[in-house]
Image (cartoon, rainbow, N blue to C red):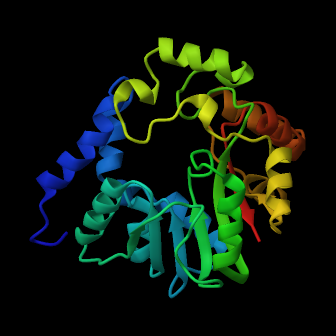
Amino acid sequence: MTSTFDEQAFVAQIDRWVAPMSWRPDYAQWREKRIWQERYQDERISTIATFGGSLPGRRVLEVSCGMGGTLVALAQAGAAPVATEFNPEYCQIARQRGQRYGLNLPIINAVGERIPFAANTFDLAICWDVVEHVQDPQAMLSELRRVVRPGGRVLLTIINRRAWRDPHYHLPGINWLPRRLADRIVARRARTKQAMGLQDRQRLSEMHYFSMRQFRRLARSVGFNVADMEAVQIQRGGKRRASGLKGRLRDLAYRLRLGLPAYYVYRDWVKGTYELVLW
């Protein structure tokens, strides 16, 4: 950390955005991870390197970098990252997070549907927790296709339309209901972002969730092939860590040599977030 960095002012900026989420049972731990995002990126950086290639010297675009944790970690791993971010205050927080370590990171206030770079600029692009929030997912995918060079990769997440526990509102079964009814239930539980006074507020019905089949169709419409990172890891003989009942069921499926079929059932009907690689 640089000696001139104002940690107290930095934390105050973050608290403005995280305090409305104090209803979370894990709020204290969750807040700490927002303040020190860059310290919790090892698994993500490993995933990026596994599916996007070696990082040192690579030009990497992060679309909607949020508060900058992954962006800083990419720079620390030797990449040459550039970011866009829709929220101007997040741009400021991300820049200051870089300044913690003497990094001057390029962060541009822009939307994913209009990426302000020339064609074939980047070796790799990443979009974590972005697709569901943009106005036009197809336009964003088209932009990613344009700015990533031939042979490059795009790593992104999408939200499962049938997710059992919604990744944004943490309510079980909400995605299996008609959206209008789901919005009313979310509002009644006082977990809607509209009730929090945040400028990025969205109702559940305004976000873009996809089944795997739906997203593959959308990605192919702009020229992308799609692979599921977790399915690829299972095919390679690896598996993700899991604890509790989910972990025991996963271990049983592997012992029965049903790892991949069991994963596909879980993915389509339970899993909240898909991690995908596009090329």
The tally of labels here is 0
**Horizontal and vertical percent for residue 172?**
62, 20
Please identify the quadrant where the C terminus is shown. Answer: bottom right
Foreground of the two, 52 or 62? 62
Is residue 56 visible from the viewing direction of this image? yes
Above or below, 183 relative to 208: above
**Horizontal and vertical percent for residue 202?**
51, 35
**Horizontal and vertical percent for residue 275?**
68, 53
For residue 180, which quarter of the picture? top right
Left or right of 194, for residue 178: right
Residue at x 14%, y 66% (from the top left corner) = 5
Left or right of 53, for residue 253: right
Considering every residue shown, the one lying at the far bottom of the view is: 57
Foreground of the two, 247 or 75? 75
Residue at x 59%, y 30% (from the top left corner) = 204
Left or right of 217, for residue 72: left
Please identify the quadrant where the N terminus is shown. Answer: bottom left
For residue 164, which quarter of the picture? top right
**Horizontal and vertical percent for residue 24?**
39, 26
Foreground of the two, 67 or 33? 67
Above or below, 35 relative to 123: above
Residue at x 31%, y 41% (from the top left corner) = 17
Is residue 172 visible from the viewing direction of this image? no
